[in-house]
Image: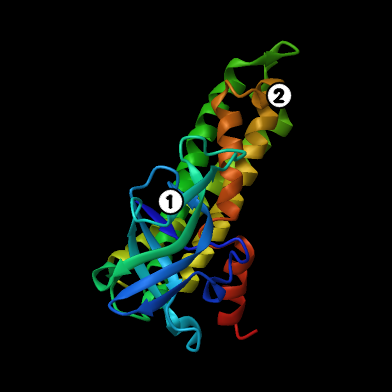
Amino acid sequence: LAIGMTEPSGGSDLAALKTSAVKDGDDWVINGSKTFITNGYSADLIITAVRTDPEKGARGISLFAIPSDAPGFSRGRKLDKVGQDESDTAELFFEDVRLSEEHVLGELGGGFIAMMQKLPQERLGCAISNVAHAKQILVETLQYTKDRKAFGAPIGTFQHNKFLLAELFTSIEVAEAYIDTCVIAHDKGELTPVDAAKAKWWSSQVQNDVLDHCVQLHGGYGFMNEYRVARAWRDARVSKIWAGSNEIMKELIGRDLGL
C-alpha cells in the first residue's frame, strides 16, 4: 500500500495538486504524476489524491484506490535517498488510467478533508518514533562513552561530554513528556492539529540534534555506516521534511497565535 499525495510541482501545498480525474461516461480517466511516494516501488494499491473538480479548490480533491496493474499506470525510478534504505520511494505516473466509480474512496470531493483529518495522527506517530529512535541511539552512545577511553579515562567523564549527555537526556525526556500528553489527548479524541504540529516539529528537531551529538561523541566511528549511530543520523534528517515540513508546522502554530 502507498499513499500518493506529493507531486513534482508542489510538496507542502497539497491543495494545489494537478493530477486530474475527468469523468468519461461511467468511468474516470486519471492523468498526472506523483513523487517521493513511500512504498511506491513495491505497492500493489495506491491511494491517490486527484483533482475531480478544478473549480472547487481543496473541495475538488478526491481519493482513488488505484491498483498497480491498472492500464496506464507506471512507476518511475526507485529514488536514491540519503537514508531510510529499508523503505523504497518512487515516482508514479498515470496516463489515461481508466477506473470505475467503485474506485472512488469516500465521498467525491472529500479527499482533502479526509487527508487533513488524519494528518494529526500521522504527525503524532512521527513524533513518537522520532523520540524513540533518538533515545535508543543516545542510550547506546552513553554506553560507548563509558567504554571508550582517551587520555587514560572514559570519554564520558570529561566535563564537556558529561554536561552534554545531561542536556541530551533532559531534551529527550522533556519531549517524551509532551508527546505522552498528546497521546492521551488523541486517545480521548481531543488532539488538536496545532498540538500535533508542535509535537512533530519539536521531536524531529530534538531527534536530529541528539543524533548529531551522538555522531560527534563517537568520533570517526560515528561516520561509518557499519555503526548504528551513523545510519540513524542519516535516517533522521528526513523527519524534518516529511509529514509536513517543520516550517509548515510552525506556520500552523503561528496562525493559531493570531499571526
Residue type highlighted by circle 2: Gly
Q: Which residue is mark 1?
A: 128
Seen at 60% across and 60% down, the residue is 8
Seen at 61% across and 86% down, the residue is 258
* Figure check: 56 above or below 35: below
Seen at 65% across and 22% down, the residue is 224
Left or right: 29 with respect to 214? left
200, 18: nearer the viewer: 18
Q: In the rendering, at what x and y percent does residue 252 appear?
A: 57, 74
Left or right: 19 with respect to 152? left
Judged from the image, the secondary structure of the residue bearing numbered disc 2 is: helix
Is residue 157 in view? no
Seen at 66% across and 38% down, the residue is 212
Residue type highlighted by circle 1: Ile
Q: Residue furthest top?
A: 152
Q: In the rendering, at what x and y percent does residue 116 appear?
A: 42, 73
Q: Quadrant of the C terminus?
A: bottom right
72, 183: nearer the viewer: 72
Q: Residue furthest front?
A: 25
* Figure check: 177 above or below 152: below
6, 162: nearer the viewer: 6
Spatial CA distance of label 1 from label 2 is: 28 Å
Q: How many marks?
A: 2
**Colour setting:** rainbow
Is residue 91 in view? yes
Q: Residues within 10 Å of mark 1 (few under 14, many from 20)?
A: many
The mark that comes first in sequence, 1 or 2, is 1
Q: Residue furthest bottom?
A: 55
Judged from the image, the secondary structure of the residue bearing numbered disc 1 is: helix
The circle on residue 101 is: none
The circle on residue 219 is: 2
Q: In the rendering, at what x and y percent does residue 5 appear?
A: 48, 63
